[in-house]
Image (tube, helix red, strand yellow):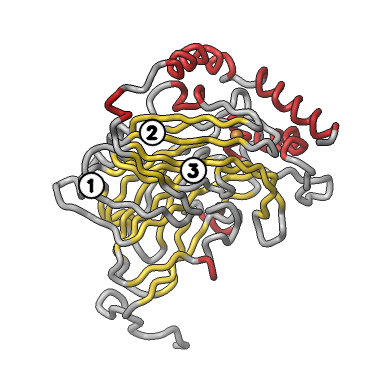
Amino acid sequence: MSEQFQVTRRSMLAGAAIAGALTPLVGAVAAHAEEAVAKAAPVDIASLPRVKVDLVKPPFVHAHTQKAEGGPKVIEFTLTIEEKKIVIDEQGTELNAMTFNGSVPGPLMVVHQDDYVEVTLNNPETNQLQHNIDFHSATGALGGGALTVVNPGESAVLRFKATKAGVFVYHCAPPGMVPWHVTSGMNGAIMVLPREGLTDGKGKSIAYDKVYYVGEQDFYVPRDENGNFKKYESVGDAYADTLEVMRTLTPTHIVFNGAVGALTGDNALKAAVGEKVLIVHSQANRDTRPHLIGGHGDYVWATGKFRNPPDVDQETWFIPGGTAGAAFYTFEQPGIYAYVNHNLIEAFELGAAAHFTVTGDWNDDLMTAVRAPSGT
Ligand SMILES: [Cu+2]
């Protein structure tokens, strides 16, 4: 390990200990965290069946049942933190990303209400920074953030009960450096399904054929004096300049799934006419307003919480920063649909767009060209 690496790592860890408005809060709950760790697991949890889930890279989602089978279980997930360089646009702009399992966003986890979520969080020795995880679906200890602060070379295991049904953001929230980690890619979502599956709020079951996970991300990449995006040796080296850009509140990129074009063209999401698709969409830091051009949200939980009846027949829905939302749609026409953040500058200029490629037969009743564009 080089001396420079050591210095950077030490200074970053020291920075984590002193900087930021949330530091006193984290310190205050640390004592409770120790108590929580010391308590033995209740016997009934020890007797529950355990299921180990292999997570998959978004936009895809691991296999799961929509209706719960049997009683509550302990669902085991592993998240390994990777600090890595990623390319975030077609011009080759580089970002020193921080990730859960190597992707931006991190993987979507799926459980059922009243299951226990047991997450092993690994911070490999090869990383520079301290990290943790805050689940918006969890209760207590900063969403688990206070129980999971791991330095490079450490790991922690957190268990929480999924008491609320819905889709929820999770993100890194280390003492003093929360927005930097979140806007460097350390966020994802968990879907806590009602045990009976999704319903329209009036008792009708609305099972989906496919689920896709779109994680929207604002990035803040520093530029040099000529306006070109800068590159840095390590994530630590990028910190000071990145913080300056973050403080302008003006992202340089707003993208779906980690890069401009990550879900367009050859990477488009696939569906067929008649297929029922659930789109889970999270934004851990900024507000967004998804819109499916040429389609709708048949059932939309804009703030993602499934005990609320969904809104129906939506054109655009609003997801506040720090929230995951869910939209259910049955495709009725073939073609290419753009799925965008309907701040169109953010979609077309900064990258917040995806495509659905939908196969099937055209329905003339729904739309037809009565007269094709022509001269008069
Ligand atoms: Cu982190």
Q: Amino acid at mark 3?
A: Gly
Q: From the viewer's perspective, is 87 left or right of 61?
A: right
Residue ID at (44%, 47%)? 108
Q: Which quadrant, please, contains the N terminus?
A: top right
Residue ID at (78%, 31%)? 8
Q: Position of residue 222 (x, y in %)?
A: 74, 43
Q: Which mark is residue 188?
A: 3
Mark 3 vs mark 1: give the one in front. Answer: 1
Q: Position of residue 121 (x, y in %)?
A: 53, 35
Residue placed furthest toward the left: 203
Q: Amino acid at mark 1?
A: Glu
The residue under label 1 is 69
Ligand 1 in which quarter: top right
At mark 2, the secondary structure is loop
Q: Is residue 289 above or below residue 240?
A: below
Using a 10 Å C-alpha cutoff, classify the residue at mark 1 as few (fewer than 14 neighbours), some (14 to 19) or many (20 or more).
Answer: few
Q: Is residue 150 above or below residue 168?
A: above
Mark 2 vs mark 1: give the one in front. Answer: 1
Q: Which of the marked residues, 3 or 1, is nearer the chain's N terminus? A: 1
Q: Which quadrant, please, contains the C terminus?
A: bottom left
Mark 2 Cβ inside 8 Å of ligand 1: no
The residue under label 2 is 137
Q: Is residue 7 above or below residue 334?
A: above
Q: Mark 3 and 1 residues: CB-CB less than 8 Å, in contact?
A: no
Q: Amino acid at mark 2?
A: Ser
Observer-nearest of 272 and 2? 2
